[in-house]
Amino acid sequence: MAPSCGGLRVVSTAPLVRRTDLAYADRMIVLALLACSGNSAILVTLQGQVVDFPSSTGVEGATLSFENANGMPLVSTTTSDLGDWSATFVLPYDTDDGAQVFGYVEHDGHVSTSVHHQLRFRDVKDAEATIHPGRMQSARILEVEPYQLAPASEFDGTVSGRVFDAVVANQAAGIGGLTLTVREGIDATETSPVVATSVTDGFPAPGDYRIDGLPAGTYTVEIAGGGIWADARFTAVSIGDEDTPDQNGATSVALAEDQFRVVLSWGAIPPDIDTHLSGPGQLELDPSLVEDRFHVFFGNKEYPAGSGPANAVVFLDVDDTSSFGPETVTVRRADPGYYKYVLHDYTNGTAAASGDTSQLSASKCKVQLFAGAAQVETYYVPTGRVGTAWTVFEIDGDSLRPYMISRFSETSDVTDPLFFY
């Protein structure tokens, strides 16, 4: 008998549509039942890549299994010959807490790892983004962190690196005295086992840490700022019987409740990726504004113009032109209105350049959003896209709630107000 709810009879439409995937039809039934029962339901597509550490080569044939917060299986899938994967499933959605997804990644020859994602769909800003009880929502595609797997080993390893201040160029300023907590898995929760603790004790240089005797595998390293520095986290991988250095994290001085900071890091190519932040401005503070919007980037590093680093409301703290980052911008007072954060591939995307427009998508960009005293979001560049500009997110100045955009496009005019505003 077909499922029904409140007089609504739900039937599979698989024979009536071109797509005959039974799992797809089942998901549509679940969506309908959840909506009919007064709950919000979300059709979600997560996508990413499973890679070997440290080679970053895609792992073919890895198995990924996902379940919801109640332990109910959602979907299983395997990776392609390049390590790419995609998984689509249905989740009930709570307007306050969002939804959580837990997963497990396995592959012969590698150490398996758990994964976790806190999904806040209100962070997707489009015509259908608002979550309404009793409604079926459209599919959301979210790019997640590359899942790094350590080679299988019965031996313990050592991880080391530095936690640096994101507002100092070239990762030059390490931060001593921070407590590090290591948990199993990727984006581990507080319920995940603690396997080690450490401190950035400043040896051999300020901010450096070293953790010996760590079983081979993938871990989340939590940075406790102690109220002075913002709480943050990063992923580290231990390889058996080896010392794997340069597994670095970033944080910065904790901000006030009405302040936020965005930190960009990336790989070696392209060497120059630029931050562009636009937002609500006041003509009485800066008569040069276009349509009451400021635009902070390498050519205009502060708002209001001419205010100087100490007095600027918005300031480009670090402009990195030689790979890796950090490149950092800080909003010292968020005003009502929306802020827009865009990354531009300056190496390939100027009028004088005719470069590779796929490099931005392959750059391994990671964007950390800090608000108040903690890191609140992390965004990863989608792979396989073409374009010299990536619109990452917008953020509401009143609530400091981010809205994920993740749109690729082309521009060669870095001062174009219609594009960046």
Image (spheres, grey):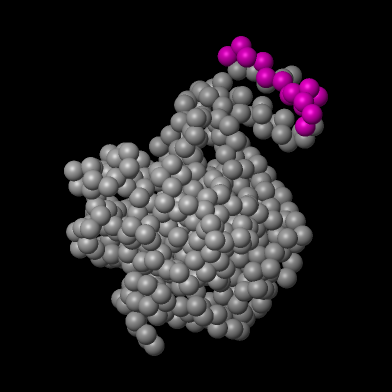
Which residue is depicted at the point 66% across and 46% down?
87
Residue 177: image x %, image y %?
31, 76
Question: Is residue 205 within the magenta segment?
Answer: no
Question: Is residue 18 within the magenta segment?
Answer: yes
Q: Nearer the viewer, residue 248 or 110?
A: 248
Q: Quadrant of the C terminus?
A: top left
Which residue is depicted at the point 49% across and 48% down?
391
Residue 2 found in image quarter: top right
| Residue 338 shows in the view | yes
Asked whether, in this view, residue 322 is left or right of residue 146, the answer is left
Q: Nearer the viewer, residue 27 or 361?
A: 361
Count numbered badges in the picture: 0
Most extreme residue toward the top, as rendered? 7
Residue 19 to residue 178: above or below = above
Asked whether, in this view, residue 5 is left or right of residue 176, the answer is right
Asked whether, in this view, residue 114 is left or right of residue 95, the answer is right
Asked whether, in this view, residue 194 is left or right of residue 292, the answer is right
Q: Nearer the viewer, residue 359 or 48?
A: 359
Residue 81 to residue 287: above or below = below
Q: Nearer the viewer, residue 298 or 180?
A: 298
Which residue is depicted at the point 29% across and 57% down?
302
Q: Quadrant of the N terminus?
A: top right
Residue 369: image x %, image y %?
40, 55
| Residue 194 shows in the view | no
What residue range appears in magenta? 6-19
Residue 51: image x %, image y %?
65, 65
